[in-house]
Image (cartoon, rainbow, N blue to C red):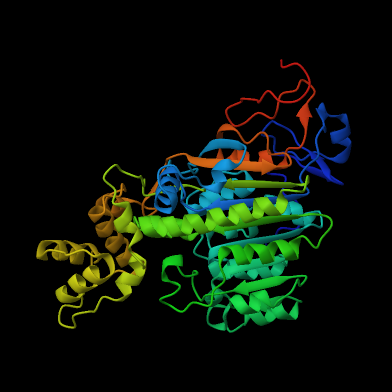
């Protein structure tokens, strides 16, 4: 980040690293703890702090998305692996200016402990730059990285790695990533690094000149070995949906493959590392009320969680935190939901939207094309009235047809209605500044070193403190959360 020259004093938790141990205050103090202050404090460092921290974000993944994925994958008695993690809580997600957050404000709260306005990235509510937990790790000489199935410059990875007033500034985010020399950057978004979007400068070449290994597909990722620094850009935009990769003959790596490589690169450093892994397209599928896509994307994320936990299983120095940044579209597994019908759908609503043909006379999609495409890809026979409603919904107030992803939202809502998936309506989504996010609480799971306090109801600004905390009060109570509640842990009597 261009002006991040030291650890910010605005973090809620004052953190001091010392070998493999560090401490923090439980109050929301704007002050950092120095080494001398640490010695004079009432804190007792009585457990090993995590040398490695892996935060895994299922974007838009609420309980409803998890239930849909579980039911489609293995039926009513099945389980997701993430559900097996021993520490479980629920998290509120509101932003500074709305009870419903966007991913920028949500990511910023998780990464920095600061509430900000919707659209803000790595800044507080006044627009002032704040540092993230990733910055803290990097400032101590530890390796750091972010991985996403979105563009690597989009809201969630950007909240850990950049500071911009508006999340749309992905070109600036790419430049900040270069300036800060993060060790692993894997995802989509090659366009934002290209000369066309960088005033004629080829940012990828600049990364190479500073020592990065650069990869662009699954095979080059596999062949890259364990370089000191790794940049992988696997799509010009966001990475393809799991459901579409066969149709597109995609050469993109899976989230599991990217994460495996990220762990290989970062774990070379004996000092430890911080890694953020995002299953981003859970959210994108949910915006379209696409239960089939939610299933596939959530299962890929869950398999990656299992892979990471297995990697950390025999270690006593690694914390794994699994959470969502917010919930999208109020999705739910309703009683009449047609599970088998949803499992038969093989492509995303966005892919279906791309197959629609435009009527040159009307400037919108032809009626015959709409009927044919829905019948072929979703096994739905639309009436003339349903086609008319669809054609109305895919146009903006000026009569222009929306971009393909927005047309995909309308395709997905028709499919969801037909197969009885619980989701926010098209009308409510259209009135939503976030495209259908809700204020519903989201799940948090944690395991490994220092994860015991990830329990109960918490706020998204509590996450950085819980990650940073490795000390307990002498009275045996764990750190207070945003509600002033402590956890009865430790050896001493509770007071």
Could you tell whether 266 is left or right of 458 in the image?
A: right
Q: Residue at x 51, y 60 (%)?
A: 167
The relative height of residue 476 versus residue 388 in the rendered view (above or below) is: above
Could you tell whether 224 is left or right of 454 in the image?
A: right
The relative height of residue 186 versus residue 37 in the rendered view (above or below) is: below
Look at the image and tell me in which quarter the C terminus lies: top right
Q: Residue at x 79, y 57 (%)?
A: 142
Query: Depth check: 335 or 34 in front?
Result: 335
Query: Depth check: 376 or 373 in front?
Result: 376
Expressed as whole percent of the image width and height from the top left, the position of residue 345 reads: 33, 64
Expressed as whole percent of the image width and height from the top left, the position of residue 328 reads: 41, 50
Expressed as whole percent of the image width and height from the top left, the position of residue 370 reads: 20, 71
Could you tell whether 367 is left or right of 421 in the image?
A: left
Could you tell whether 452 is left or right of 333 in the image?
A: right
Look at the image and tell me in which quarter the N terminus lies: bottom right
Residue 127 seen: no
Determine the image quadrant of residue 491: top right
Q: Residue at x 68, y 39 (%)?
A: 451
Query: Depth check: 24 or 146 in front?
Result: 146
Residue 48 seen: yes
The relative height of residue 208 versus residue 5 in the rendered view (above or below) is: below
Q: Residue at x 66, y 63 (%)?
A: 260
Expressed as whole percent of the image width and height from the top left, the position of residue 99 reads: 43, 40
């Amino acid at each position: 980040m261009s002006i991040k020259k030291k650890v910010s004093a605005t973090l809620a938790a004052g953190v001091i690293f010392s070998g493999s141990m560090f401490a923090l205050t439980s109050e929301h103090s704007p002050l950092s703890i120095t080494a001398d202050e640490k010695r004079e404090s009432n804190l007792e460092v009585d457990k090993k702090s995590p040398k490695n921290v892996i935060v895994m974000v299922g974007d838009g993944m609420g309980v409803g998305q998890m239930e849909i994925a579980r039911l489609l994958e293995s039926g009513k008695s099945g389980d997701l692996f993430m559900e097996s993690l021993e520490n479980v809580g629920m998290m509120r997600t509101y932003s500074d200016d709305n009870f419903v957050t966007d991913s920028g404000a949500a990511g910023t709260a998780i990464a920095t402990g600061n509430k900000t306005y919707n659209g803000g990235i790595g800044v507080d509510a006044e627009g002032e730059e704040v540092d993230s937990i990733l910055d803290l790790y990097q400032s101590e000489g530890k390796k750091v990285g972010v991985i996403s199935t979105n563009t690597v410059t989009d809201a969630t990875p950007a909240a850990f790695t950049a500071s911009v007033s508006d999340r749309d500034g992905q070109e600036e985010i790419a430049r900040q990533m270069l300036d800060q020399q993060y060790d692993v950057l894997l995802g989509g978004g090659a366009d934002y690094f290209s000369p066309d979007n960088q005033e004629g400068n080829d940012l990828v070449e600049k990364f190479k000149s500073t020592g990065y290994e650069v990869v662009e597909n699954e095979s080059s990722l596999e062949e890259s070995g364990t370089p000191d620094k790794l940049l992988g850009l696997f799509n010009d935009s966001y990475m393809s949906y799991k459901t579409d990769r066969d149709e597109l003959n995609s050469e993109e790596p899976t989230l599991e493959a990217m994460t495996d490589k990220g762990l290989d690169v970062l774990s070379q450093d004996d000092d430890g590392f911080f890694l953020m892994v995002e299953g981003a397209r859970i959210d994108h599928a949910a915006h379209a009320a696409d239960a089939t896509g939610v299933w596939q994307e959530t299962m890929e994320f869950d398999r990656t969680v299992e892979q990471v936990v297995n990697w950390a299983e025999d270690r006593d120095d690694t914390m794994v935190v699994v959470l969502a940044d917010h919930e999208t579209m109020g999705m739910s597994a309703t009683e009449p939901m047609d599970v088998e019908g949803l499992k038969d759908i093989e492509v995303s609503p966005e892919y279906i939207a791309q197959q629609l043909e435009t009527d040159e006379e009307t400037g919108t999609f032809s009626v015959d094309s709409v009927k044919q495409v829905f019948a072929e890809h979703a096994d739905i026979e639309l009436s003339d009235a349903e086609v008319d409603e669809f054609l109305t919904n895919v146009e903006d107030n000026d009569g222009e047809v929306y971009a393909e992803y927005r047309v995909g939202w309308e395709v997905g809502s028709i499919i969801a209605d037909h197969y009885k998936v619980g989701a926010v309506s098209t009308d409510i989504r259209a009135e939503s500044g976030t495209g259908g996010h809700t204020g519903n609480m989201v799940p948090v799971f944690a395991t490994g070193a220092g994860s015991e306090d990830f329990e109960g109801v918490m706020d998204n600004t509590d996450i950085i403190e819980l990650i940073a905390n490795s000390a307990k009060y002498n009275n045996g109570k764990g750190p207070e959360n945003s509600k002033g509640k402590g956890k009865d842990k430790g050896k001493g009597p509770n007071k």
